[in-house]
Image (tube, helix red, strand yellow):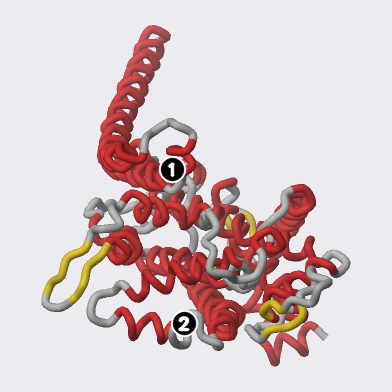
Amino acid sequence: MNQWLDERLNISRLNDKFLRKAFPVHHSYFLGEITLFSLIILILTGIFLALFYEPSQQLVANPLDPKGTQVPAAFASVIQINGLPYGDMLRRIHHWSANIMMGAAVIHMMRIYFTGSYKKPREINWWIGVLLLVFTALTALTGYSLPYDNYAYTTLKVIYGIAGSIPWVGDFIAQLAFAGQFPGDRLIPRMYGYHIMLLPGVLLGLTAAHMLLMIKQKHTQPGYAKRIAYKKIVGVPLLQDQSFIMVMLGLLLLGIIMLFSAFIPVHPVEFYGPPSNQTPPIKPDWYFLWIFGILAILPSTLEFNILGGTFNSEFLGGVLGAGLIVLIFLAVPLLDRTSGREMHYYSENPTDHPVRLGLGIAMTALLLVLSVAGYKPEIVNAGVLTNENANPVFWIASVAVPVIAYFLTIGIVRMIRWLRAADERDQRAAAAADD
């Protein structure tokens, strides 16, 4: 039977080329698999949620109001999902899977950056990774707009305003993306199409391209592989060993997600209620908080005109600022001019490249400062800062904290190198004394 299948499907070649592919045995290399497993859980739970969700703004009876008020069908269907056996649990699993996927992807990209694994010939895979981060965030954004409660309504209104702020073409882009003027009758069907078809299709395509390139170019090897077998692939085969590790990792991830889902509630649709003209206090998920922080500390009156185009705070913070950060990430392989004969094989020690390490820590510090700025109203209400000095403090911190982080990192790396050199001198002295 095996010979019959091999003659027709060439299974032996499949086994030699793919099923025996060597995977590095190092904990940091599991971050990509955690991202992939989270995507799978998101797709499976999303399929079940889609069976009960109604992507419509048509008014129907409010399940929460015995007096018979009417609410959008999308809002009512989410209330009904919460009332199903394990319906609320399923929404929680979907929510926490998205957060864990985003977190694992961010840490995965940090590992690649700090170890220089984006260098030739892996620049394309770095760009694919950045695009995966962007489209994962957009998929999540369209997802938490679907309940169409007052929180989602306010969020969509803010995003519509940011899209409409683009000079010269803002109105066209906003209406194209949101199916007309906000809030049009086709708003939720459009967001639903983005969330379950367009964006997942993009994510699956980018994931497939990422994995094919990884198989073609192979993993970068951890540092210890150089000592074990120079310029050889060191790891365990996919089918015989790595597959069992992946199954255990997947089950552990699912257990952690279910534990989170059992004890930590997610978006309280009932609390916010259906869409209204009242603006509730909203906060985006953590991966959008830095953009929210930029908008919070930019003066709302900031506006100027150039050649008939209006440049306001929404455009400068929500479009230009966020786009500039993404472009910097995309440009990393082009800006890094360091090279080496072994860059195709081994991950680099971050302390061997202090400037790259310092810049990465500085960028992380900047995003953290901007994320904290997203809590400006709470900080002002707590009396830590006044409304008048909050913006200057955060702008100064946005410059000072990354600069301090950069030079502090450089200083720590120099100290590590000095201690390492001193240790090597002591070892050589001890060896000479023994001789």
Residue drawn at x 44%, y 31% as measured from the top left: 383
Quadrant in which the N terminus appears: bottom right
Residue depicted at 37% across the width and 69% down the height: 162
Position of 388 relative to 296 (above/below):
above
Q: Quadrant of the C terminus?
A: top left
Q: Residue furthest bottom?
A: 8
Which residue, as the protein is rendered here, is positioned at the far right?
85
* Observer-nearest of 421 and 231: 421
The x and y percentages for residue 384 are: 43, 31
Q: Within 10 angstroms of label 1, few (less than 14), some, or many (20 or more) residues?
A: some
Q: Position of residue 245 (x, y in %)?
A: 71, 54
| Residue type at tag 2 | Phe
Residue 208, how many percent across, how many down? 54, 75
The secondary structure type at the circle numbered 2 is: loop
> Which is nearer the eye, 188 or 57?
57
Which residue is found at the position 38% from the left and 18% from the top? 423
Q: Is residue 184 visible?
A: yes
Please identify the residue farthest to the left as the structure is shown: 307
Residue 287 in the image: above or below residue 71: above
Callout 1: SS: helix
Q: Which residue is mark 2?
A: 178
Q: Which residue type carries mark 1?
A: Val
Q: Residues within 10 Å of mark 2 (few under 14, many from 20)?
A: many
For residue 284, side relative to residue 47 (left or right): left
Please report whichever mark, 2 or 1, sits nearer to the chain's N-terminal start. Answer: 2
State which quadrant residue 334 falls in. bottom left
Mark linked to residue 372: 1
Seen from the viewer's position, the closer of residues 329 and 179 is 179
x 50%, y 80%: residue: 183
User: In this view, which residue lies farthest toward the top?
Assistant: 433
How many labels sit on residues?
A: 2
The image's mark for residue 425 is none
